[in-house]
Image (cartoon, rainbow, N blue to C red):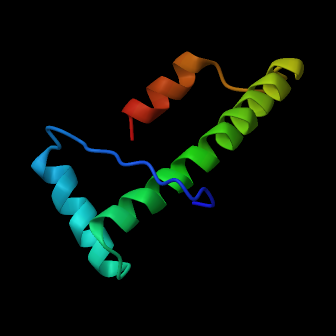
Amino acid sequence: MHNTCMRSLQIRELPDEIYTKLKIRAQSEHRSLAQEAIAILERSLAIEPMARQRRAAILYSAQQQPIKLPTNAPRPEELIRADRER
């Protein structure tokens, strides 16, 4: 919101459920509907790239590590049977 030229956004066909949740959240944060919508957009747009990068790094790390099962691990059939007998 550092730009002196503020753009306007109109959302058509906003579902009632979303409007109601936004209104409740805005009231709890002591903001107008527009202020709350801007705050939500700012947070989600700033977080999304970081979350995507973190997820990619975790997946890459997991792919680099071979899966090592214990040699004395029970067979899947034994685990299923034991679960059913509980």
Q: Position of residue 47 (x, y in %)?
A: 62, 48
Left or right position of 56 against 13: right
Q: Residue at point 47% right, 51% down?
A: 41
Q: Position of residue 7 (x, y in %)?
A: 43, 48
Nearest the camera: 28 or 1? 1
Number of marks present in the image shown: 0
Q: Residue at point 80% right, 31% down?
A: 57
Nearest the camera: 54 or 25? 25
Q: Residue at point 37% right, 58% down?
A: 37
Q: Position of residue 6 (x, y in %)?
A: 47, 54
Nearest the camera: 46 or 10? 10
Q: Is residue 9 above or below residue 31?
A: above
Nearest the camera: 61 or 32? 32
Q: Quadrant of residue 34?
A: bottom left
Q: Residue at point 64% right, 18% down?
A: 75
Quadrant containing the N terminus is bottom right
Left or right position of 3 against 37: right
Q: Quadrant of residue 56?
A: top right
